[in-house]
Image: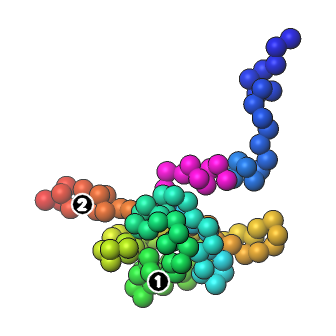
C-alpha cells in the first residue's frame, strides 16, 4: 500500500512550525523581552524600517517607534495591564521618516519560563491615504 501524502511529509516539531510561520509571515514581527529589548525579528521587520539584518541587531525601541507619544504610552499601559493590546502608533524608518502603523502585541511565557512579547506591525500609510481620499 502506498503511503498517504501526510505520511510522506516529514513531521515537524512545534519549534519548526513556529519558526516557519514567523519567517514567512506577511507582516513585520518581532519578539522583545520584558525590558523592551528586541531579541528576534523577521525579514519583513527589517524591510519595514529600512535596516539590514546586521543593523537591526543594534537597534533599540526608540530608534523605530515614537515612544514619547500618548498613543504609545496608552498602548503600553493597556498591554501591561491586560497582557494584550493593539493600537495605531508612529514608526520611524532608518531615513528618519515617520509613518503611521498598527501594532498588535501579546505577552506570554516561553517554554523556558521567560516573559516574552510578540509584536506585529503593519504600515497603514496607504489605509490612511485612502480614508482621506474617500472623505474628499
User: Residue 98, position in %: x, y?
Assistant: 32, 75
Q: Quadrant of residue 77?
A: bottom right
Instruction: Say which residue label 1 marks.
Output: 62
| Rendered residue at 24%/60% (across/down) | 129
Mark on residue 129? 2
Q: Relative to residue 106, is residue 108 drawn left or right? A: right
| Mark found first going from the N terminus, 2 or 1 | 1
Residue 75: say if magenta: no
Highlighted magenta segment, given as a residue range? 19-27
Q: Can residue 124 be seen in this view?
A: yes
Instruction: State how the image is colored.
Output: rainbow
| Rendered residue at 51%/78% (across/down) | 59
Q: In which quarter of the image is the N terminus?
A: top right
Q: Would you place residue 4 above or below residue 117 in this image?
A: above
Find numbered disc 2 in the image and state the secondary structure of the residue it sits on: helix
CA–CA distance between discs 2 and 1? 25 Å
| Rendered residue at 32%/74% (across/down) | 95
User: Residue 65, position in %: x, y?
Assistant: 44, 78
Magenta portion: prevailing SS class: helix
User: Residue 63, position in %: x, y?
Assistant: 44, 81
Amino acid at each position: 500500500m502506498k503511503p498517504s501524502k501526510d505520511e510522506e511529509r516529514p513531521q515537524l516539531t512545534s519549534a519548526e512550525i513556529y519558526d516557519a510561520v514567523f519567517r514567512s509571515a506577511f507582516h513585520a514581527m518581532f519578539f522583545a523581552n520584558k525590558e523592551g529589548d528586541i531579541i528576534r525579528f523577521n525579514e519583513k521587520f527589517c524591510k519595514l524600517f529600512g535596516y539590514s539584518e546586521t543593523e537591526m541587531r543594534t537597534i533599540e525601541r526608540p530608534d523605530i517607534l515614537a515612544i514619547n507619544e500618548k498613543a504609545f504610552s496608552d498602548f503600553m499601559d493597556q498591554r501591561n495591564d491586560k497582557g494584550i493590546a493593539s493600537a495605531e502608533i508612529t514608526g520611524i524608518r532608518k531615513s528618519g521618516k515617520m509613518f503611521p502603523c498598527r501594532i498588535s502585541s501579546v505577552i506570554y511565557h516561553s517554554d523556558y519560563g521567560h516573559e516574552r512579547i510578540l509584536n506585529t506591525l503593519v504600515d497603514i500609510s496607504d489605509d490612511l491615504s485612502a480614508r482621506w481620499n474617500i472623505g474628499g
